[in-house]
Image (spheres, grey):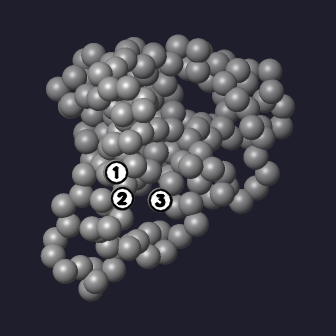
């Protein structure tokens, strides 16, 4: 969903590059990377950063976030992830991140050109979503589930829990207006 949302926001022809793209860059003027919760001590991006370092093409990353970590774990982030984020900072106006905690982690890594935009899927309809506060009966208390599977819960259990959480949010929360 977040990847499709990014494609919908680009007002020109897009060429899908895939994960091994070093030989498919003819005519490409800018690389746009829709991202999710990529910043984690567990994820390495050696291959991606090596491919990008071989080009001089501007690179933008939209919607990157932290995963399964807190801001005290900054020193545990793999060097390839830090190289990737710094390369993107050098070649783009700013990094689009999912939230304030992600911005804080990037600032601790020395990455200052950061803009909190949230998940790109919020802009699926090319409009900024908003909550109609006049319809609220009382303050909302909403819990959100992670999008990756955890090692300590089966895929089936995770799917059931996500579905139940979604139903609860839908029944208790205000309708998002576009």
**Label placed on residue 104:** none
Q: Which mark lies nearer to you, 3 or 1?
A: 1
Q: Is residue 110 left or right of residue 57?
A: left
Label 1 near label 3: C-beta < 8 Å?
Answer: no
Q: Residue 158 location, x and y as percent? A: 37, 35
Q: Is residue 23 left or right of residue 85?
A: right
Distance of label 2 from label 1 (alpha carbons): 5 Å
Above or below — where is 169 with respect to 109?
below
Q: Residue at x 27, y 68 (%)?
A: 172
Q: Where does label 1 land, which residue?
A: 164
Q: Where does label 3 land, which residue?
A: 122
Q: How many marks?
A: 3
Asked where in the image residue 28 lies, by quadrant, the reply is top right
- Which of marks 2 and 3 precedes in the sequence? 3
Q: Is residue 37 left or right of residue 1?
A: left
Q: Where does label 2 land, which residue?
A: 167
Q: Secondary structure at mark 2?
A: helix
Distance of label 3 from label 1 (alpha carbons): 21 Å
């Amino acid at each position: 969903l977040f990847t499709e949302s990014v494609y919908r926001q680009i007002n020109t022809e897009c060429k899908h590059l895939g994960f091994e793209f070093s030989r498919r860059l003819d005519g490409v003027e800018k690389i746009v990377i829709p991202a999710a919760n990529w910043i984690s001590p567990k994820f390495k991006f050696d291959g991606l950063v090596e491919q990008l370092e071989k080009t001089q093409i501007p690179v933008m990353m939209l919607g990157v976030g932290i995963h399964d970590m807190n801001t005290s774990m900054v020193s545990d982030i793999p060097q390839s992830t830090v190289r990737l984020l710094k390369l993107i900072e050098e070649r783009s106006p700013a990094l689009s991140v999912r939230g304030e905690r992600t911005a804080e982690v990037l600032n601790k890594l020395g990455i200052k050109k950061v803009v909190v935009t949230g998940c790109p899927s919020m802009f699926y309809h090319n409009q900024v979503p908003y909550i109609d506060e006049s319809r609220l009966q009382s303050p909302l208390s909403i819990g959100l589930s992670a999008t990756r599977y955890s090692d300590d819960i089966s895929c089936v259990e995770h799917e059931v829990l996500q579905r139940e959480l979604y139903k609860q949010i839908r029944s208790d929360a205000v309708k998002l207006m576009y």
